[in-house]
Image: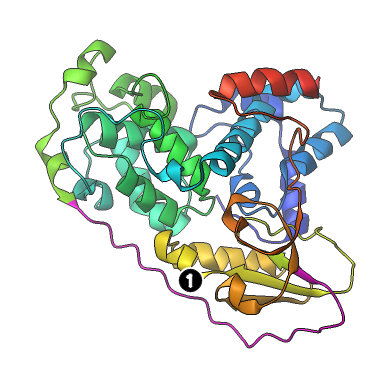
Amino acid sequence: MEFPTNLAEVYQRIDQFDPEQYARTRNFITGGVSYLSPYLSRGFITVPQVVKRLKDRGIGLEQAEKFIQELAWREFYTRTWFQKGDAIFEDIRHPQEGIERLGIPRAILEAKTGIKALDTHLATFAETGYLHNHLRMYLAATICNVAKYHWLEPAQWMYYHLLDGDLASNALSWQWCAGTFSNKLYYANQENINRYTGSQQRGTFLDLDYEDLPSQHAPNHLQRSVEAELVFTPPKTEPLVIQSDVPTFIYTHYTLDPTFHEGEAGNRILVLEPSHFAKHPMAPKTIEFILSLAENIPGIQVYYGEYADLNLKGIFRDHPINVHFQGVREVHPSLAPGLQGEFNSFFSFWNKLSRQLS
């Protein structure tokens, strides 16, 4: 799957998306998924924009409910990030049970898990920057709950390579699978993997009944742990030219909406902070993708440095990544901007949100 970076092509992707086919087939890796996640994660398009374009085609909540529910997961995770801050990078509700090792299995990095459906996609992951959601869950289940690794380092490895890498969605999804953000561990056996990937493999270490998976001893080849090398390469930038008589609009790699104050005179700066990428590195391919999306914003300049060192008060969209920014903070577009409160589970959030949407 290719991910164009031209806004018109992204809008076309939204307009060609069939949410009813998505509801029927989304769990299959060849199913009718939207392929919008890289654009949503980067804030290049917003959830309300997507929903509006569906409504403009006469597609209402009932037809698109399953898809909108998946979009709501994204908002739930972002809300959790706002509320918990960096605590999302720790076991957030329960300590992870049964940890036997840290790091990441060498077999994952070498695409030699022995599960053909996983290895096929692992072999191209660094090149594509994309994995179907079911494949991400299969990997998390295998690494955390079968091979008994702590979730954090594998999650960091996956985030590094993902074009749609969203810190909250990624970390909390791994925690959901590992049982630290849910009430049970997630397992996937070979039968499940075969069903949703089209594989016909048998006789693997996952070819067990579900009641037998928790007691499965970690296969030897998954016990060999390494530390993934996640090297961040800073982007090449030019000195900023800032006009003092106009406002300055600030963008981040999570808030890249070209329609933000569109048409207004002002400086436009994409801020990429070294302190952030030191903790949460991204692959060169992902940075290239981000910079290409930014080209849709006329006159934007790229700044690799700390926001505080700009010594200005910009105008920006609120997001957990920029809670330390000084300036004019505008509400990030969401499905239900007036929805208040802290929600202990997605479904308590969804129940309230769906009533408001109705």
Q: Residues within 10 Å of mark 1 (few under 14, many from 20)?
A: some
Looking at the image, residue 352 sits to the left or right of residue 278; the answer is right
Q: Residue at x 41, y 69 (%)?
A: 232
Q: Residue at x 32, y 23 (%)?
A: 187
Kindly identify which residue carries mark 1: 274
Q: How is the image coloured?
A: rainbow
Name which quarter of the figure residue 6 lies in: bottom right
Instruction: Give above or below for 136 relative to 193.
Output: below
277 in the magenta segment: no
Q: Nearer the viewer, residue 30 or 26?
A: 26
Q: Residue at x 63, y 68 (%)?
A: 292
- Amino acid type for the residue under numbered disc 1: Pro
Q: Secondary structure at mark 1?
A: helix
Q: Which stretch did the figure color magenta?
A: 226-249
Q: Nearer the viewer, residue 229 or 31?
A: 229
Instruction: Give above or below for 134 relative to 43.
Output: above
Looking at the image, residue 178 sits to the left or right of residue 54; the answer is left
Residue 15 in sight from this viewpoint: no
Picture coordinates of residue 34, whole percent (x, y):
64, 39
